[in-house]
Image: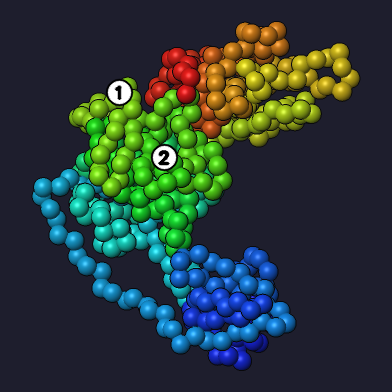
Amino acid sequence: MYSQKVLKALKAKNIKPGDYINVRKNGKVYSGILMPKTEFGDPDALVLKMDNGYNIGIKFEKGVLIEKSDKKVVKKVSKIPSIAFDPKKPVVSILTCGGTIASKIDYETGAVYPAFRPEEIVGIVPELKDIANIKSKYVMNLLSSNMHPLHWPLIAKEVKKAIDDSYGVVITHGTDTMHYTSAALSFMIQNLPVPVVLTGAQRSSDRGSSDSHMNLIASVIAAKSDIAEVMICMHGSSNDDFCYLHQGTKVRKMHTSRRDALKSINVEPYAKIWYRTGDVQYIRNDFRKRGEKKDMIFDPRINPNVGLVFVHPGIKPEFIDNLAKFYDGVVLAVMGLGHVPTNKNDKLVNPIIENVSNLVNSGIPVVVAPQTIYGRLNLNVYDYGRKLEEAGVIGNYCDWTPETALVKLMWVLGHTKDMKKIKEMMLKNYVGEISEISEMI
């Protein structure tokens, strides 16, 4: 809410959110649509949406003048057109799970809300109708930071249904945890007959620099490709030129705000999607090609009760001990090649090897992953790495990301509680989550 001081000034001018106004301050004039004030930020700051799509905040203080503009906000209440089915084009299903990739803004409430019907989606991104016949289904509408592991089987079931009558599947999803979901779907639906493509947007669709349209167009193009894998399709650079297709288990969000924040880890992307021409430029050829559904394995069983802990200087041994109270499995993101504090001869060091060993002996599987993100673990290089392996951890020589290791352990624990079987399944390379060789990327 705006402060009482601001509300009084707006009321005096008969101004309300959604009106086009001019704000004069320090000899400059700022024009735009007055947006509703959220619960965050300075209540004395007027928020305007400018013509270029960006928001600006202007501190309301002595000397600031506000006036209602003669310019009217055009509120389009256009009829949603029907879409004619084109028998020459394949059907691509879009499953909406959240994010702002296919969304529009309500200037009276300030809310950016998703479009769910195919007519709405095509109305926002009309280029899609030239690529495929679009089907859509609402699955959920979540900020991806609210995604829970038990949402993944729900999404997997909808993907399975969509595969029955689609040439490819696109999933809209928030970017923060997209790589967790792509890893989960990779394990839950193996031997896919068609592409399954997750996509999202780093910038909201009401912003001039939004990546939503390009990413969605590229994703539908990718859904028509021959790559029958779970993938993420996002900007490949900071420019609006191409998108990368990232392998679902070898990708991670690596920047808070850049449009090319999603990066392939320890492998090259599968392909580049040139969205203006519709060309698919293949970079790798080690992918499953689209084919028949008879080989598909649908196995969404999962145990969400797994924790991910980053080992750090000063980590407390008793913290490791207490993990057994909360989790059925633990992933430790370890230092370097696979290291944790071990030195008993320095009184400032708190070694945790014994605590890790006790955790394993109590029946809690402990998996290790590199907190460096890039590279492969090798516990045999240094003595303290060997001690960690002797403690019973799983993951030596693996190059999975901490997030993929977390998701895989959840999936494995959904199948067995036997420690020997857990280790066997964790070290089996199901969907390319463990690279056979390390390449210089």
- Residue at which label 1 appears: 285
- Residue at which label 2 appears: 236
Q: Position of residue 136 (x, y in %)?
A: 29, 53
- 123 in relation to 160, above or below: below
Q: Is residue 302 left or right of residue 47?
A: left
Q: Amino acid at mark 2?
A: Gly
Residue depicted at 12% across the width and 53% down the height:
86
Residue depicted at 67% across the width and 12% down the height:
385
Which residue, as the protein is rendered here, is positioned at the far front? 27
Observer-nearest of 187 and 105 = 105
Residue depicted at 50% across the width and 48% down the height:
144
Q: In the figure, residue 298 lies in which quadrant?
A: top left
Q: Are marks 1 and 2 in contact (CB under 8 Å)?
A: no
Q: Earlier in the sequence, mark 1 or mark 2?
A: 2
Q: Quadrant of the N terminus?
A: bottom right
Q: Position of residue 405 (x, y in %)?
A: 53, 27
